[in-house]
C-alpha cells in the first residue's frame, strides 16, 4: 500500500506498474486517495460528490484481473475525477448549480465510459462554476475552490476543481470542459497541464451543455505524457454525438518522442500587447527561446482579428447558453419552486431560485442577442467575426506548426478580487477564447513562476486534429524546463 505522502508522486504509468507488479492494489490505492481527499479537500473544496461505491467496485475488478495475471488495460487502477458537468449514472451531477442539486442521471457521459473501460477508477465529481460559466470557480452554487498553490487565490475556472484536484495530489488525472478557456486557464493558475482538443475530437455526449458549438472535454494531468494518455483513451468518433469527428486517433504517446527540430513555432504579436503582466511575458518569452534552443524555428505570425474575440465570444456563448438552459424549467427534472399558483409563475420562480447571478446574466445577454431586431446586429455579426478568426488561424498554420502564447494575462488573482467586476473577469479570457471560436486544439503547461511563486502557463495552439504535434512540442519543452 502506498504511503499517504507518496501518492502525490503517482503517475498513470507508475500506478499501472505498481498494480501489475503487485506492489499495491487498486482498492488500496483508491482508499489512500480517499484518505488524502478527506485530509486536503476541506481547505480546497475541489470535490462536490464522492463516488466510493462505484470506485471500489471498479478497483475490485482491476484487482481480480491483476490477481489472475490478465493483461491490464492502459489506465488500470488510475484514480481520476470528473468535472461535475459530465453526467454519471447513479452519481449526483449538479453542474455546480442549485437547479440540479439532487439530479442523479440515468446514463454516463461517453468520456467517462471510455475512461472506465480503460480501467480508470472514478473517485468523484469536481466543483466548477455554475454550468461552466466563469473564470474563477467562485460562481459555484456550493462553495468556491481554493488554489492549492496559494489558498487565498482562485484556481481559475470554470474547471477549477479539476485543476485543483491534480495540483493537490487528490487525483492522478481529471476531466474538465473548456468553452472559452476553462481547461487551459485553471491549468495555468494551478501549475498543471491542461489540454483542450480540437472541436469534435472528443464526444460531448453526456456533457451538460453551456454553448454547444464551443464546448470541449479534455484532460488535466501533471505531465504532458499523462494528458496524451488520457486523450488517447477518450478521443474518437461516437455515434451518440453527431458533432464528433470520424477522424483517426493517432497514438499520441508514441508521437511524443519524435524530434521537434525544424518545426516552426509561430509567435503572434496580438498575444503580447497591453495588459500582459511583465513577469508572465518574460516567462513565456523564455519558454519560446527554449523551444528555439531545441531546434524549433520561431516565426512571427499575425492573428489580426484577435481584438474582436472577446465580444464575439460573449455573444455566441451567451446566445447558445440562453437556448440550452431553457430546458431547466422545473417541469421535467431538477429543482422546482414550491407553491406556485400558475405554470408561468412556476417557471419564473424556479429559474429565479435555481440559477445564480452569473448564469442569469448570461441568459439575459443571450436572449437579447437572439431577439427580433437584434439577431443580425449581434449574433449573426459575431458568427462572421468567428469565421474571420478561424481564417486567421488557417493562414498562420500555413506558415507554422504550432503557435506559442501566454495562457493568461496574469497569474492567479485573489478570491473575491474580480467577482463584482464581470467585465474584468471576461477580459481575463482574452488569450483562450480564440481557440474555442476557431475549434483548434490548445494546451497549457507550466513555464515558470512569478515573484510570489504563483505558476505561469505557456499556451500552444495546433492545427485542427493535430494534437500529436501540439503534444510533441509541449513534451519536448517540458523535459527541458
Image (cartoon, helix red, strand yellow):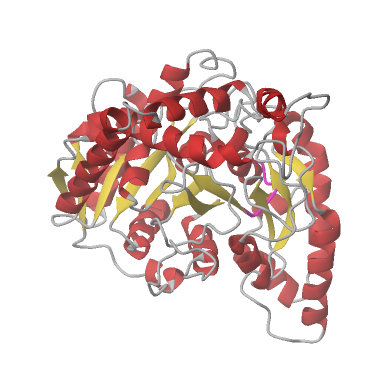
- Quadrant of res 102: top right
- Quadrant of res 382: top left
Q: x, y percentage for residue 381?
A: 25, 34
**Relative to 350, 293 lies left or right:** left
Q: In this view, does 204 lie above or below 325?
A: below
**Which residue appears at 75% of the width and 58% of the height?**
106
Q: x, y percentage for residue 472?
A: 36, 62
Q: Quick one: quadrant of the N terminus?
A: bottom right
Residue 57 visible in the snapshot = yes
**Which residue appears at 68% of the width and 84% of the height?**
71
| Nearer to the camera, 299 or 136 | 136
Q: Is residue 250 above or below residue 404?
A: below
Q: x, y percentage for residue 2?
A: 79, 58
- Residue range in magenta is 168-173
**Which residue appears at 83% of the width and 79% of the height?**
64
| Nearer to the camera, 159 or 366 | 366
Q: Is residue 276 above or below residue 336?
A: above
Q: x, y percentage for residue 292?
A: 22, 50
**Which residue appears at 35% of the width and 22% of the height?**
277
| Nearer to the camera, 179 or 373 | 373
Q: Is residue 403 found inside the magenta-colored segment of the image?
A: no
Amino acid at each position: 500500500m502506498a504511503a499517504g505522502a507518496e501518492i502525490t508522486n503517482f503517475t498513470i504509468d507508475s500506478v499501472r506498474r505498481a498494480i501489475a507488479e503487485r506492489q499495491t492494489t487498486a482498492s488500496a490505492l483508491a482508499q489512500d486517495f480517499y484518505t488524502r481527499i478527506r485530509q486536503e479537500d476541506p481547505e480546497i473544496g475541489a470535490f462536490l460528490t464522492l463516488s466510493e461505491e462505484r470506485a471500489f467496485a471498479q478497483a475490485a475488478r482491476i484487482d481480480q484481473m491483476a490477481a489472475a495475471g490478465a493483461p491490464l488495460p492502459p489506465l488500470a487502477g488510475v484514480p481520476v475525477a470528473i468535472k461535475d458537468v459530465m453526467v454519471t449514472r447513479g452519481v449526483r451531477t449538479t453542474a455546480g448549480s442549485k437547479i440540479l442539486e439532487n439530479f442523479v442521471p440515468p446514463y454516463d457521459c461517453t468520456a467517462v465510459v471510455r475512461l472506465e473501460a480503460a480501467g480508470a477508477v472514478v473517485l468523484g465529481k469536481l466543483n466548477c462554476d455554475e454550468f461552466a460559466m466563469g473564470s474563477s470557480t467562485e460562481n459555484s452554487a456550493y462553495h468556491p475552490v481554493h488554489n492549492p498553490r496559494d489558498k487565498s487565490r482562485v484556481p481559475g475556472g470554470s474547471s477549477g476543481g479539476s485543476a485543483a484536484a491534480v495540483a493537490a495530489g487528490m487525483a492522478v488525472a481529471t476531466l474538465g470542459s473548456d468553452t472559452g478557456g476553462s481547461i487551459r486557464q485553471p491549468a495555468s493558475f494551478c501549475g498543471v497541464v491542461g489540454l483542450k482538443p480540437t472541436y469534435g475530437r472528443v464526444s460531448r455526449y453526456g456533457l451538460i451543455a453551456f454553448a454547444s458549438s464551443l464546448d470541449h472535454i479534455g484532460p488535466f494531468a501533471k505531465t504532458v505524457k499523462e494528458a496524451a494518455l488520457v486523450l488517447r483513451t477518450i478521443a474518437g468518433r461516437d455515434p451518440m454525438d453527431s458533432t464528433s469527428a470520424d477522424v483517426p486517433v493517432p497514438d499520441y504517446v508514441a508521437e511524443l518522442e519524435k524530434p521537434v527540430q525544424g518545426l516552426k513555432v509561430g509567435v503572434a504579436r496580438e498575444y503580447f500587447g497591453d495588459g500582459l503582466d511583465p513577469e508572465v511575458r518574460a516567462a513565456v518569452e523564455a519558454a519560446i527561446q527554449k523551444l528555439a534552443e531545441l531546434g524549433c524555428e520561431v516565426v512571427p505570425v499575425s492573428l489580426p482579428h484577435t481584438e474582436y474575440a472577446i465580444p464575439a465570444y460573449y455573444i455566441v456563448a451567451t446566445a447558445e447558453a440562453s437556448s440550452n438552459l431553457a430546458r431547466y424549467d422545473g417541469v421535467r427534472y431538477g429543482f422546482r419552486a414550491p407553491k406556485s399558483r400558475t405554470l408561468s409563475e412556476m417557471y419564473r420562480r424556479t429559474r429565479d431560485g435555481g440559477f445564480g447571478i452569473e448564469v442569469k446574466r448570461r441568459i439575459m445577454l443571450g436572449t437579447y442577442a437572439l431577439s427580433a431586431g437584434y439577431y443580425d446586429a449581434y449574433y449573426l455579426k459575431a458568427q462572421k467575426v468567428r469565421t474571420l478568426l478561424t481564417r486567421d488561424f488557417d493562414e498562420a498554420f500555413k506558415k507554422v506548426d504550432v503557435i506559442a502564447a501566454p495562457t493568461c494575462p496574469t497569474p492567479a488573482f485573489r478570491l473575491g478580487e474580480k467577482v463584482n467586476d464581470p467585465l474584468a473577469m471576461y477580459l481575463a479570457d482574452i488569450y483562450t477564447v480564440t481557440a474555442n471560436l476557431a475549434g483548434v486544439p490548445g494546451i497549457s503547461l507550466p513555464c515558470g513562476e512569478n515573484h510570489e511563486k504563483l505558476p505561469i502557463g505557456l499556451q500552444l495552439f495546433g492545427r485542427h486534429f493535430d494534437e500529436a504535434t501540439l503534444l510533441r512540442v509541449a513534451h519536448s519543452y517540458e523535459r527541458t524546463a
